[in-house]
Amino acid sequence: MIVTMNEILKYAEENNIAIGAFNTPTLESLIAVLEASEEKNVPVIIMHAELHEPIAPLHIIGRVMVELAKNSKVKVCVHLDHGEHLDYIKEALELGFSSVMYDGSLLPYEENVKNTRICVEMAKKYNASVEAEIGVLGGRESAQTKAITKKEDLYTDPELAKRFVLDTNIDALACSFGTAHGIYKETPKLDFERLETIHKETKLPIVMHGGSGVSPKDYIEAINRGVRKINYYSYMAREGVYATREYVIKDKDIVFYHDIAFNAKEAMKKDVLRALNIFYFKEIK
């Protein structure tokens, strides 16, 4: 069943958990996430990031995502992740996405607010939810981030976050408190006090971007401080690579690509199940 992000995040708030939000640029990753969520009987968010357009064009993968969500046994939100262009966001909404993110975090504040407001008004016409970002997440390269020498200076200012929420009327806030996109080269140091303050000031569900690779203990601490949506992709995708590499080395006589794809899907599903156990049931193993 396809639902909005608001509906799923309300469930997360009521149960003090976080919803797993997984980027699914391939059919294998998409099936892995949906099979895992149905096996655990929990709601989930499947996402298409604008930067994955060259890998999986929105007009193709988006239709598949919406159709599979409609037929899922659990509640599924279909979300556009890091939409940087309003036309692209509109295309996702027209395809049936139930949630979108406008990412103007690298823009000047006023321009970010202006475009986010446009996104909010656009999404209302489709009964869709809106996430937006204030602060600069680690792992993103720009003149702005390169000019900053201290990581802490990239973190979201709680007062600015409060102002941004009031200025835009968004449904969920992505903020920077120590996570980063991609594979971590060192253990991330999360600013939990900042996170808790942002949650209290904005009174909105907080989204953790760069969620892959965070320790189970830190996931749970972040959830207890207000995180209600955890974006997860890099480490799931890496498990697919690891499984494929091992499979190919072990069996030199592999002929069919679908055998490799299935093996990768199973490995990604296993990693998704591990993440869901932490996000929803707070299991540490």
Image (cartoon, rainbow, N blue to C red):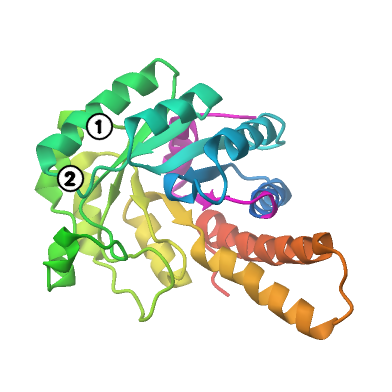
**Closer to us: 265 or 255:** 255
The image shows residue 168 at horizontal and vertical percentages of: 21, 30
Residue found 52% across the figure and 51% down from its top: 23
Judged by depth in the image, the label closer to the viewer, 2 or 1, is: 2
Residue found 40% across the figure and 75% down from its top: 184
Is residue 25 a member of the stretch shown in magenta? yes
Is residue 37 a member of the stretch shown in magenta? no
- Amino acid bearing label 2: Leu
**Closer to us: 280 or 3:** 3
Quadrant in which the N terminus appears: top right
- Amino acid bearing label 1: Thr
The image shows residue 117 at horizontal and vertical percentages of: 23, 26
Residue found 37% across the figure and 55% down from its top: 208
| Disc 2 residue crowd, few under 14, some 14–19, many 20+, Cα 10 Å | few
The image shows residue 249, relative to residue 72, as above or below, that is below
Tag 1 residue: 116
Q: Secondary structure at mark 2?
A: loop
Q: Which residues are magenta?
A: 1-28
Instruction: Give the CA separation, mark 2 to mark 1.
Output: 11 Å
Tag 2 residue: 107
The image shows residue 102, relative to residue 25, as above or below, that is above
| Labels 2 and 1: the sequence-earlier one | 2
